Amino acid sequence: MSGDAVIHRGVGKADPEWFENRFAANGWTGAWRNGVYGYHHYHATTHEVLGCYAGTARLQLGGPAGEVHDIAAGDVVVIPAGLAHCNLGSSADFAVVGAYPSGVSPDLQDGAGDA
Protein backbone atom coordinates (compact mmCIF):
# COMPACT_ATOMS: atom_id res chain seq x y z
CA MET A 1 0.00 0.00 0.00
CA SER A 2 1.26 3.48 -0.81
CA GLY A 3 0.34 4.87 2.60
CA ASP A 4 -2.38 5.16 5.16
CA ALA A 5 -5.16 7.69 5.21
CA VAL A 6 -5.32 10.15 8.09
CA ILE A 7 -8.69 10.97 9.63
CA HIS A 8 -9.17 14.07 11.77
CA ARG A 9 -12.47 13.84 13.62
CA GLY A 10 -14.68 16.83 14.38
CA VAL A 11 -12.23 19.50 13.26
CA GLY A 12 -14.41 21.25 10.67
CA LYS A 13 -17.70 23.05 10.49
CA ALA A 14 -20.99 22.17 8.79
CA ASP A 15 -20.16 24.74 6.11
CA PRO A 16 -18.57 23.93 2.74
CA GLU A 17 -17.01 27.40 2.45
CA TRP A 18 -15.22 26.87 5.76
CA PHE A 19 -13.54 23.75 4.32
CA GLU A 20 -12.76 25.43 0.98
CA ASN A 21 -11.13 28.39 2.73
CA ARG A 22 -9.21 26.24 5.23
CA PHE A 23 -7.95 23.87 2.52
CA ALA A 24 -6.90 26.76 0.22
CA ALA A 25 -5.07 28.50 3.08
CA ASN A 26 -3.00 25.32 3.45
CA GLY A 27 -2.23 24.82 -0.25
CA TRP A 28 -5.08 22.40 -1.09
CA THR A 29 -6.85 24.13 -3.97
CA GLY A 30 -9.09 23.28 -6.90
CA ALA A 31 -11.87 22.43 -4.45
CA TRP A 32 -15.09 20.72 -5.48
CA ARG A 33 -18.32 19.73 -3.69
CA ASN A 34 -20.04 16.37 -4.03
CA GLY A 35 -19.94 12.93 -2.42
CA VAL A 36 -17.62 9.94 -2.72
CA TYR A 37 -18.03 7.38 -5.50
CA GLY A 38 -19.64 4.07 -4.56
CA TYR A 39 -16.90 2.04 -6.24
CA HIS A 40 -13.23 1.53 -5.45
CA HIS A 41 -11.12 4.17 -7.13
CA TYR A 42 -7.88 6.03 -6.53
CA HIS A 43 -5.70 8.82 -7.81
CA ALA A 44 -2.24 7.64 -8.85
CA THR A 45 -0.78 11.11 -9.32
CA THR A 46 -1.97 13.09 -6.30
CA HIS A 47 -3.14 13.02 -2.72
CA GLU A 48 -6.72 14.08 -1.93
CA VAL A 49 -8.37 15.72 1.07
CA LEU A 50 -12.07 15.38 1.89
CA GLY A 51 -13.92 17.58 4.36
CA CYS A 52 -17.34 16.26 5.34
CA TYR A 53 -19.74 19.16 5.88
CA ALA A 54 -23.04 17.25 5.99
CA GLY A 55 -24.34 13.81 6.87
CA THR A 56 -22.49 10.58 7.48
CA ALA A 57 -20.81 7.90 5.37
CA ARG A 58 -19.08 4.58 5.67
CA LEU A 59 -15.84 4.74 3.66
CA GLN A 60 -13.60 1.82 2.82
CA LEU A 61 -9.98 2.91 2.51
CA GLY A 62 -7.39 0.65 0.93
CA GLY A 63 -9.42 -1.34 -1.61
CA PRO A 64 -11.85 -4.23 -1.10
CA ALA A 65 -9.83 -5.63 1.81
CA GLY A 66 -9.23 -2.19 3.37
CA GLU A 67 -10.46 -0.81 6.66
CA VAL A 68 -13.96 0.65 6.94
CA HIS A 69 -14.37 4.00 8.68
CA ASP A 70 -17.51 5.90 9.61
CA ILE A 71 -17.19 9.63 9.01
CA ALA A 72 -19.52 12.47 9.89
CA ALA A 73 -19.91 16.21 9.39
CA GLY A 74 -16.80 17.94 10.71
CA ASP A 75 -14.39 15.13 9.81
CA VAL A 76 -11.44 15.50 7.43
CA VAL A 77 -9.88 12.57 5.57
CA VAL A 78 -6.46 12.86 3.89
CA ILE A 79 -6.01 10.13 1.27
CA PRO A 80 -2.52 9.50 -0.10
CA ALA A 81 -1.96 8.95 -3.81
CA GLY A 82 -2.60 5.35 -4.81
CA LEU A 83 -4.91 4.53 -1.88
CA ALA A 84 -8.30 3.32 -3.12
CA HIS A 85 -11.44 4.64 -1.47
CA CYS A 86 -15.11 3.77 -1.78
CA ASN A 87 -18.41 4.94 -0.28
CA LEU A 88 -20.11 1.83 1.10
CA GLY A 89 -23.21 3.76 2.13
CA SER A 90 -24.16 7.22 3.29
CA SER A 91 -26.99 9.34 4.60
CA ALA A 92 -29.10 11.16 2.01
CA ASP A 93 -27.53 14.49 2.98
CA PHE A 94 -23.88 13.31 2.87
CA ALA A 95 -21.61 15.87 1.21
CA VAL A 96 -17.90 16.67 1.14
CA VAL A 97 -15.52 19.30 -0.13
CA GLY A 98 -12.57 17.71 -1.88
CA ALA A 99 -9.27 19.31 -2.90
CA TYR A 100 -5.76 18.47 -4.06
CA PRO A 101 -2.33 19.84 -3.17
CA SER A 102 -1.43 22.91 -5.23
CA GLY A 103 -4.62 22.51 -7.29
CA VAL A 104 -3.31 19.47 -9.15
CA SER A 105 -5.85 17.91 -11.51
CA PRO A 106 -6.40 14.35 -10.33
CA ASP A 107 -6.43 11.29 -12.49
CA LEU A 108 -9.24 8.83 -11.77
CA GLN A 109 -8.36 5.14 -11.71
CA ASP A 110 -10.83 2.32 -11.05
CA GLY A 111 -9.78 -0.51 -8.78
CA ALA A 112 -7.95 -1.38 -5.61
CA GLY A 113 -4.96 0.94 -6.06
CA ASP A 114 -1.62 0.12 -4.46
CA ALA A 115 -3.24 -1.93 -1.69
Image (spheres, grey):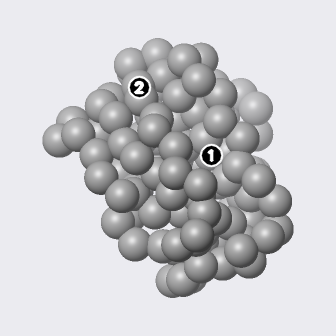
Q: Is residue 23 toward the left or the right of residue 56 in the image?
A: right
- Residue at the location (65% across, 28% down)? 8
Specify whether 13 is left or right of 37: right
Position of the N terminus, as image quadrant, is bottom right
**Where's the C terminus, which quadrant?**
bottom right
Residue 31 spot, x, y in % from top left: 53, 46
Q: Which residue is drawn at 17% across and 41% down?
A: 92
Disc 1 to disc 2, C-alpha distance = 14 Å
Disc 1, SS: strand
User: What is the crowding at mark 1: few (fewer than 14 residues within 10 Å), some, or many (at least 20)?
Assistant: many
Whether 86 is drawn above or below 59: the answer is below
Which residue is situated farthest in the bottom direction here? 110
Q: In this view, does 18 lie to the left or right of 106?
A: left
Kindly identify the residue that appears in the image at 54 percent across and 63 percent down. 85
Q: In which quarter of the image is residue 50?
A: top right
The percent coordinates of residue 11 (x first, y second) are 59, 17
**Residue 21 position in % (x across, y down):** 58, 26
Q: Tag on residue 49?
A: 1
Residue drawn where x is 59% and y is 55% of the image: 67
The residue indicated by pointer 2 is 73
Tell me if mark 2 has few (under 14), some (14-19) or many (20+) residues whose alpha carbon lies within 10 angstroms of its own. Answer: many
Amino acid at pointer 1: Val
Determine whether the residue tagged by mark 2 lies in a helix, strand or loop: loop
Amino acid on which the number 2 mark rests in the picture: Ala
Q: Nearer the viewer, residue 59 or 65?
A: 65
Mark 1 near mark 2, Cβ–Cβ under 8 Å?
Answer: no
User: x, y (%) of residue 54?
Assistant: 33, 29
Q: Which tag, 1 or 2, sits closer to the chain's start? A: 1
Report whether residue 62 is seen.
yes
Which mark identifies residue 67? none
The one nearer the camera, 88 or 32, is 88
